[in-house]
Image: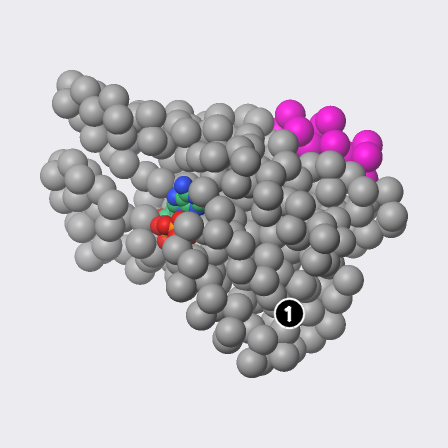
């Protein structure tokens, strides 16, 4: 444990697995109080337990980011327990590649509702708290998880990639708007990371592509992204590293 992030209140969405889980653990180990948000309560409880046993502070909040009331309730709970958030890792997302001609409107909508509207719901609920923290002189960070899919072109990834292009462009705009208020805004654009994300894919063409990639590339680990978040939020307050593209070395 270090006290590098002591005094920071971190909110992590998508904290029940993968990148969010690893990031919550790392931020807590560096002294932040962390609120971990996702739908799967048991996994969150296990994470909180582990953090507390190691001497950190954490709270679990069952949240569905497709439901504004659920996100708003979490924002109230965080502020009541820990004070205003000063670090929001806006990270929950889903990837469901598929051929456009399969016409899976339900999967398209699911990705848009989580990766685009979900990101906006979290922004709506937590940016006021980030502003309060910044006004109080506390370093204040909004970090959105985008993807290299936001800039690379892959067959079958049109809708997912479009959601991530949205997140990247949104982030650039928000940085310019919130920077003058002393809120840093950043995006992380990872290549392939070994998490549960690939496990939700139903389309065979994309499954084959991902299986082939997994054989030929040493995927990033969630901890690699957590380290990146830890780095961004520990920079001096006047430094906003806006965009990080982080790739497995072997990924083209
Ligand atoms: P995981 O599938 O391991 O994690 C996704 C997280 O999102 C889970 O904690 C899940 O929790 C949560 N989540 C899903 N739906 C909802 C919902 N409706 N409400 C609240 N939480 C929800 O994947 P990753 O860790 O890989 O993904 C994290 C982010 O990283 C995503 O935005 C993804 O697009 C992005 N990314 C991932 C890459 C990769 O290769 N893995 C590459 C580039 C970007 P629960 O089910 O408990 O709700």
Near-viewer residue (107 or 207): 107
Q: How is the image coloured?
A: one colour
What residue would you read off at disc 1? 57
Q: Is 54 situated left or right of 191 in this image?
A: right
Relative to residue 117, is residue 140 depicted above or below? Answer: below
Residue appearing at x 62%, y 60% in the figure: 34
Q: Residue furthest right?
A: 136
The span shown in magenta is 172-182
Kind of element beneath mark 1: strand
Mark 1 within 8 Å of ligand 1, using the beta carbon: no
User: Looking at the image, can residue 110 be seen?
Assistant: yes
Relative to residue 228, is residue 170 depicted above or below? Answer: above
Residue appearing at x 81%, y 32% in the figure: 180
Characterize the magenta stretch by its predominant secondary structure: helix
- Indicate whether residue 174 is drawn in magenta: yes
Q: Which of the 4 image quarters holds residue 35?
A: bottom right
Q: Which of the 4 image quarters holds residue 179?
A: top right
Where residue 128 sits: x, y (%)? 73, 36
Where residue 54 sits: x, y (%)? 58, 80
Residue appearing at x 53%, y 68% in the figure: 48
Q: Is 185 situated left or right of 21 in this image?
A: right
């Amino acid at each position: 444990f270090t006290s590098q992030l002591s005094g920071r209140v971190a909110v992590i969405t998508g904290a029940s697995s993968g990148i969010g889980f690893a990031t919550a653990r790392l931020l807590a180990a560096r002294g932040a109080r962390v609120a971990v948000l996702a739908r799967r309560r048991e996994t969150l409880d296990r994470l909180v337990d582990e953090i507390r046993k190691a001497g950190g502070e954490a709270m679990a909040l069952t949240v569905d980011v497709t439901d504004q009331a659920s996100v708003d309730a979490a924002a109230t709970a965080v502020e009541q327990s820990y004070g205003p958030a000063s670090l929001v890792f806006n990270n929950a997302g889903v990837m469901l590649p598929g051929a456009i001609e399969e016409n899976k409107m339900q999967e398209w909508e699911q990705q848009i509702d989580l990766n685009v509207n979900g990101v906006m719901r979290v922004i709506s609920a937590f940016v006021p708290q980030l502003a309060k923290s910044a006004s109080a002189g506390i370093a204040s960070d909004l970090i959105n998880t985008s993807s290299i899919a936001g800039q690379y072109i892959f067959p079958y990834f049109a809708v997912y990639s479009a959601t991530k292009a949205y997140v990247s462009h949104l982030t650039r705009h928000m940085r310019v708007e919130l920077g003058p208020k002393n809120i840093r805004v950043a995006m992380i654009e990872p290549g392939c990371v070994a998490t549960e994300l690939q496990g939700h894919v139903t389309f065979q063409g994309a499954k084959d592509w991902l299986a082939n990639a997994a054989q030929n590339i040493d995927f990033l680990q969630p901890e690699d992204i957590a380290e990146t978040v830890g780095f961004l939020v520990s920079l001096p307050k006047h430094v906003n590293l806006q965009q990080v593209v982080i790739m497995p070395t072997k990924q083209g």
